Structure formats: structure tokens, C-alpha cells
Amino acid sequence: MKMKPTFKKIISLLLLVFISWSCSSNLDFDQANDIKISPVIVANLTYFDVPAPELVINDVETTVVFNALNFDAFRDSFFKDNLVRADLFFEITNTINRDYVIDLFLFNKLNQPIYSINFNVPASSGTPQVVSKTDIFQNVKLDILKQTEKMGFRLVMLPGTPLTKNSLGSLKLRSSATVYMEIQ
């Protein structure tokens, strides 16, 4: 009977030696410095919906409309420092029977225009006219975008059938930004 405990001890000792005799390597904790995270974020940028009657003031067509909005996306230094690309997407739907030119302006902190995007929007002739455009900002162009503090829109109505307070349709813009970041 005394052999069993001795046999168990020998097996246990051999098992312990076998387990401790495993492969190992040095750990490199400096690899944590090499981590790079590349998130992609999609967000709404701006939106407007201008019904045709709003383009008539005191029975007179308003052929030029301008509106500027604060654009403070780049006031956050973390966002500004880690941004490597931005895709701005715009879609304009025209259901008014008039042609339009829409200009988007990006302004710096001195209210000077530093970039513009132009859209020629055809008149609706019973079916909505949809114009879309994606503007990609990388490298030097991205540096221009990072200076942006305001965004402005100018709507120019081109000659055509006069609008009245009872005119139908609207001019809609929806836009989004897809931003690509690289965080190290």
C-alpha cells in the first residue's frame, strides 16, 4: 500500500517538471506604442429645405439667397490632429420648375472664403432633379478644410417661369461627412 502514494508522488513530480518545461519568449511591451487605430465616422453635415413660396417676398422673386453657419468641427485639437481624410457628400433635390446654381463656401476665421463647391441644378419638369457630388479632402486640400470656421450657401435662381406665392416644389439639400482618422 505504500507504493501507491510514492507512485502518485513520482507521477505528480514528473507532471510538474513537464508542465514547467514549456516554451516561452520575452514579452515586448513596446509593441503598445505601435498600435494604430483607424476609425471611420459618418455624420450629417447640413440640411435645408426651401419651399418655392419662400423664394417670393412681397410678390417679387428672390433670385439670390445667402446663409452662413458656424462650422466648429475643427476647434477640437484631437479631431484636427488625427484627421487624415474627409469626404463631403452633397445631394440636392429640385422639384421647382427653375434652374439653380448653388455655391457652397468654406470661410476661415477672418470670414474669408478659402474653398468653394459649385452645383448646377436643373429645373424640375414634373420629376425631381437630383444632383449629387462628393468632394474628397486629403493632404493640402485637407489643410484647407481644417481652417474652416464657417460654411455658407448661396442659391442663385436662373431666369425662367416666374415664381409666385402659390408655386409648388422645393429645393432640398442634404449632406454628410465621412471622416477618416488615424490615432497612434
Image (cartoon, rainbow, N blue to C red):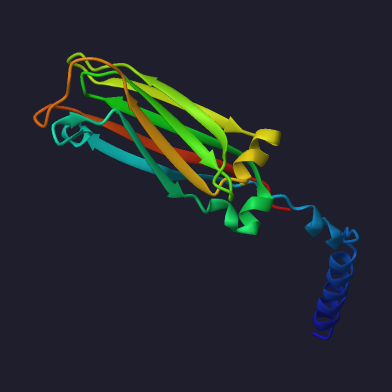
> Is residue 117 shown above or below 18?
above
Number of numbered markers? 0
Q: Position of residue 91 (x, y in %)?
A: 38, 29
**For residue 139, what is the image quadrant?**
top right
Q: Which of 128 and 158 lies nearest the eye of the viewer? A: 158
Residue 37 visible in the current orientation: no
Residue at image coords 70%, 35%? 140
Residue placed most toward the observer, 5 or 184: 184
Determine whether, in the image, residue 150 is placed left or right of residue 96.
right
Quarter of the view holding residue 10: bottom right
Q: Is residue 163 left or right of residue 3?
A: left
Quarter the N terminus occupies: bottom right
- Does residue 35 appear in this view? yes
State the residue lying farthest toward the left.
166
Q: Is residue 166 above or below residue 11?
A: above
Q: Residue at x 20, y 37 (%)?
A: 54
Q: Residue at 52%, 31% (x, y): give it.
A: 116
> Residue 15 appears at what percent x and percent y?
83, 69
Residue drawn at x 54%, y 43% as measured from the top left: 107
Q: Nearer the viewer, residue 78 or 151?
A: 151
Residue 42, compared with residue 125, is above or below; it is below
Image location of residue 97, percent across then percent down = 21, 18
Residue 147 image position (x, y, % from top left): 62, 46
* Front one among 23 and 174: 174
In the displayed structure, 10 sits above or below 179; it is below
